Amino acid sequence: MPLHLLAISGSLRAGSSNTTLLKAARALAPEGIVVELYEGLGALPHFNPDLDVAPWPTPVVDLRARIGAADGLLICSPEYARGVAGAMKNALDWMVSVEDFAGKPVALFNASPRATHALAALRLTLETMAARVIDAASLTVPLWSAPLSEEGIATDPALAQAVRRALEAMVRA
Ligand SMILES: Cc1cc2nc3c(=O)[nH]c(=O)nc-3n(C[C@H](O)[C@H](O)[C@H](O)COP(=O)(O)O)c2cc1C
């Protein structure tokens, strides 16, 4: 069975650098790793504990099923106003009450070296939720200042190697 990683971008923007980095990871994944891009972030309702009961909203059921089926997560999310993008935090809030989220291996990809506050906050949230952030599988690359396409990342030797190494670290984790 291949290792199945669910990639979640915290940006809803069509030309998102965070989503592009995850798409490049999907393209660069070596044999034995399948990267699936989660595309339901924008359809999730705002987290409300009153809605966290049966029958759960369909997008929430879908998110939980995809995360539950994944061996690990690749998360790449922008920083807005020195915080985690709201759409990303909203998705995580929907996972707080899900028991099998604990222990889930997570690689934190970061498309901007400037986005240190969001990265730290994201890590704190994930650790609070008992996810396992895999440092060896996490990386920061400067895509924000010099946007690259998916192909541009995949054909850049240094970037491609960094992404491949991160994916291989997920296999080991
Ligand atoms: C409203 C807004 C607030 C932002 N705040 C920050 C910030 O606090 N720190 C930072 O490094 N970048 C900030 N940025 C820049 C974004 O993180 C940057 O545009 C990033 O590339 C967005 O991700 P995306 O390309 O995946 O959409 C902000 C951008 C916007 C639109």
Image (cartoon, helix red, strand yellow):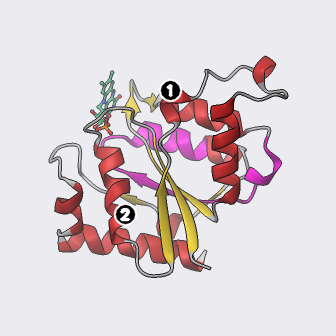
Q: Measured from the top left, where is residue 17 in percent x and y?
A: 28, 44
Q: Measured from the top left, where is residue 99 in percent x and y?
A: 82, 48
Sequence-wise, which precedes: disc 2 or disc 1? Answer: 2
Query: Which quarter of the figure is the C terminus placed in?
Result: bottom right
Vertical side of 1 occupied by 39: above or below: above
Query: Which quarter of the figure is the N terminus placed in?
Result: bottom right
In the image, what residue occupies the spot 39% across and 32% down?
12
Dot 2: element: helix
Q: Residues within 10 Å of mark 1 (few under 14, many from 20)?
A: some
The residue at which mark 2 appears reads as 25
Q: Is residue 93 visible?
A: no
The total of numbered circles placed on residues is: 2
Specify start and end residues of the magenta stretch as a single range.
98-124
Q: Measured from the top left, where is residue 118 in percent x and y?
A: 45, 37
Amino acid type of disc 2? Ala
In the image, what residue occupies the spot 35% across and 68% down?
163
Vertical side of 79 occupied by 127: above or below: below
The CB of the residue at mark 2 lies under 8 Å from ligand 1: no
Amino acid type of disc 1? Gly
Q: Measured from the top left, where is residue 161 in percent x and y?
A: 29, 75
In the image, what residue occupies the spot 63% across and 51% down?
66
Q: Are marks 2 and 1 in contact (CB under 8 Å)?
A: no
Q: Quadrant of residue 166?
A: bottom left
| Dot label at residue 86 | 1
Is residue 103 highlighted in magenta? yes
Vertical side of 77 occupied by 51: above or below: above
Dot 1: element: helix
